[in-house]
Amino acid sequence: MSRFWSEVTKSLEPYVPGEQPQLANIIKLNTNENPYGPSPKVIQAISEQTTADLRKYPEPDSDALKQAVAGYWRIAPKQVFVGNGSDEVLAHVFMAFFKGEAPILFPDVTYSFYPVYCGLYQIPFEQIPLTDQFRIDVATYQRKNGGIIFANPNAPTGVALKRTDIEELLRQNTDSVVVIDEAYVDFGAESCVPLINSYPNLLVVQTVSKSRCLAGLRVGFACGSEELIEGLERVKNSFNSYPVDRLASAGAIAAFEDTKYFEETTEQIIYNRKMLTDGLKKLGFTVLPSKANFVFTSHPKGAERIKDELREQSIVVRHFQGARTSDFLRITVGAYREMKTLLAALEQIVK
Ligand SMILES: *Cc1c(COP(=O)(O)O)cnc(C)c1O
């Protein structure tokens, strides 16, 4: 604490990201990074931007990048907002739509950045319990609210809602903004982007960090009605007028253009996830059904203990304290060989 800090600064409980340890031969399965590098076309596109033109500011409204995203989803560029990673997009979302008197709603188990932003912007919130099967029950969101947000597939559970369930929620809830954080949607869940023309209060947030192998680039975006996007632009332009830099923009555009690479790597992750899930079950683990690039899994031997023993073998996975999560490990789906090595290590640990 410093006497120079404002009252808000003193009250903050910042988000703690998964660590980036510098271990030799590490198998890093703690932050849901994609094991496959970005498409070679992305590397090429970024290299082409490393010229004297870097002296110039990037496009203030990221029009070319918006066009690439809009083209992929077959929506209008005016229905797209972009930022430095979806975390930044989410920060603007909380400011633009959630900062009011009524509490916003999100699950008791979900992305832990949401309560952090509520602290930063002083937004009241209520956490709605997941069911015993760690599912979101949309009927439990039928109450007065200042907005609703959750990840689909949810994090850190990996469990996905069907688009028809989210439509049900949107039909019940027409007076506040519903934000679906689709950071992991490409690994087998149903995106709600096709619903944005029908529901003006729906905002879908996505990122190139997970399925497009570009966590280091920091590009995220939101799709929604023009009025929502305009609200986000107002907040963005009151904060930072040039959010996405030249290199990031070029890389992200190339990633959207190379659909073949995207589809191949995504399918490989889904394949590896099935292999990992089957292997874990054989070793006595309980595994929640995942549509993400990670699994949420528990074992009678105890999650924290298993995490520590894996770490001794330079395999890093994530463990979350908290009443409903502390029995579980969240394990990122890595490359096929990494999953084989992980399962071999776990076999020794649990036997
Ligand atoms: C990874 C993740 C994000 C943030 O992604 P960035 O675009 O890298 O900032 C947002 N939401 C959820 C649920 C995530 O898991």
Image (cartoon, grey):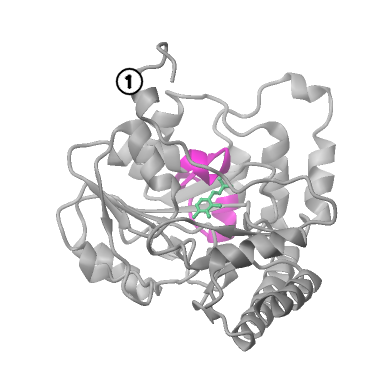
Residue 324, x across and y down, in percent: 39, 64
Q: Which residue is mark 1?
A: 7
44 left or right, relative to 250: right
- Extreme residue toward the top, this view: 4
**Camera-side residue of 283 and 340:** 283
Q: Residue at x 66, y 48 (%)?
A: 215
**Camera-side residue of 298 and 211:** 298
Q: Is 168 situated above or below 280?
A: above
104 left or right, relative to 162: left
Q: Which residues are magenta?
A: 69-89
- Quarter location, residue 282: bottom right
What kind of residue is marked 1?
Answer: Glu
Q: Residue at x 37, y 61 (%)?
A: 323
Q: Is 84 situated above or below 346?
A: above
Q: Secondary structure at mark 1?
A: helix
Residue 142, x across and y down, in percent: 18, 63
Q: Is mark 1 within 8 Å of ligand 1?
A: no
- Say whether residue 76 is magenta: yes
**Camera-side residue of 39 and 293:** 293
Q: Is residue 186 visible?
A: no
Q: Residue at x 54, y 60 (%)?
A: 73
Q: Residue at x 59, y 69 (%)?
A: 187
- Quarter location, residue 84: top right
**Camera-side residue of 283 and 257:** 283
